Amino acid sequence: MVIELIGGLLSGSLALLADTLHNFSDSSSILISYFAYKLGLRPKNKRFTFGYKRVEIFAALINGTVLLTMYIFLLRESVIRLLHPESLKSGIVIWVASAGLILNVLSTLLLKKDAENNINIRSAYVHLLSDSISSVAVILAAIIIHFTNAYFIDPLLTILIGLYVMKMAYGIIANSVNILMNTAPAGIDINDIKKEIEALEGVINVHHVHLWQPSEHDIHFEAHIEIPDMNICATEPLLKKINDTLKTKFNIGHTTIQFENNICDDKSILKNTH
């Protein structure tokens, strides 16, 4: 990233600077994940009863926002360069992008083995693989410019890289905001959850449901569940069935279930509050 930044400034290549930001995004994401993981190991306390799981979400939101802002300015400069092409030192671009390609390939090979068994490492692996492809594109563009002086290719490639990275940045921002707003996880319909639980023997009604994610990989669920009048100890097998169903079919690992018998007047799936 540092090599490409220096090379981009010396050569005047926007495509090289765009690739620098791309590498910055991936590197910072890996660092954020690492430090968030280390912070997340800290024990829960009376003030932070959920622990520090959302540190990573806040960091990802900041990272995505900064990246999006930087690329907006870079795209603006690219449009100006496209309308008024400027010369650049293609030789520097070729050598710097080649160094970036070698380092990206080496990093990709380091992660390849563990990427098969770990989704987080696989994510980093895919990002580094895309960085390698981006470096190849920059090298090819520089070679074409070197032989044809078609300087418009540099800002054009910058725009293409920028649009791709901005799409990723928008996805990071949107996902972070959804988690921070306690939005129900995509792909899970609370009506489906209600049907699955109410299909279990002993369940009369499921209502006042809440479904949210405190962090990217944790899904929490809470609800009032109406059951026939029975002793508390008799509800334990039913609770186990409910938790097993939620874990198996919806990957919900944390539940708060309130058993009751004809207490709530409002038995809608979502509690109506004013």
Image (spheres, rainbow, N blue to C red):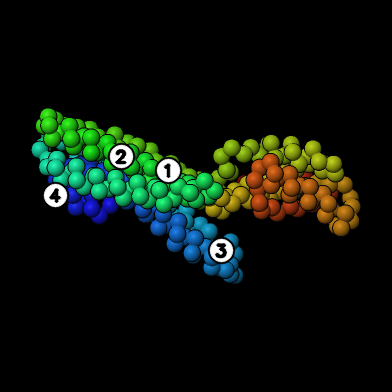
Q: Amino acid at mark 4?
A: Leu
Between residue 68 and residue 42, name the one nearer to us.
42
In percent of width and height, residue 153 lies at: 19, 32
Residue 85 lies in quadrant? top left
Q: Give the SS element for disc 4.
A: helix
**Label located before the other in sequence (2 or 3):** 3
**Label located before the other in sequence (1 or 2):** 1
Instruction: Please name the residue that numbered disc 4 is placed on.
Output: 10
In percent of width and height, residue 118 lies at: 53, 50
Instruction: Please name the residue that numbered disc 3 is placed on.
Output: 51
**Label located before the other in sequence (2 or 4):** 4
Q: Give the SS element for disc 2.
A: helix
Q: Give the SS element for disc 3.
A: loop
Q: Residues within 10 Å of mark 1 (few under 14, many from 20)?
A: some
Is 133 positioned to the left or the right of 110 in the image? left
Residue displayed at 21% across by 34% down: 141
Q: Nearer the viewer, mark 2 or mark 3?
A: 2
Q: Give the SS element for disc 1.
A: helix
Q: Amino acid at mark 1?
A: Val
Mark 4 and 1 residues: CB-CB less than 8 Å, in contact? no
Distance from Cα at disc 4 to Cα at disc 1: 29 Å
Instruction: Please name the residue that numbered disc 1 is placed on.
Output: 126
Residue 189 lies in quadrant? top right
Distance from Cα at disc 1 to Cα at disc 2: 12 Å
Mark 2 and 4 residues: CB-CB less than 8 Å, in contact? no
Instruction: Name the mark on residue 134.
Output: 2
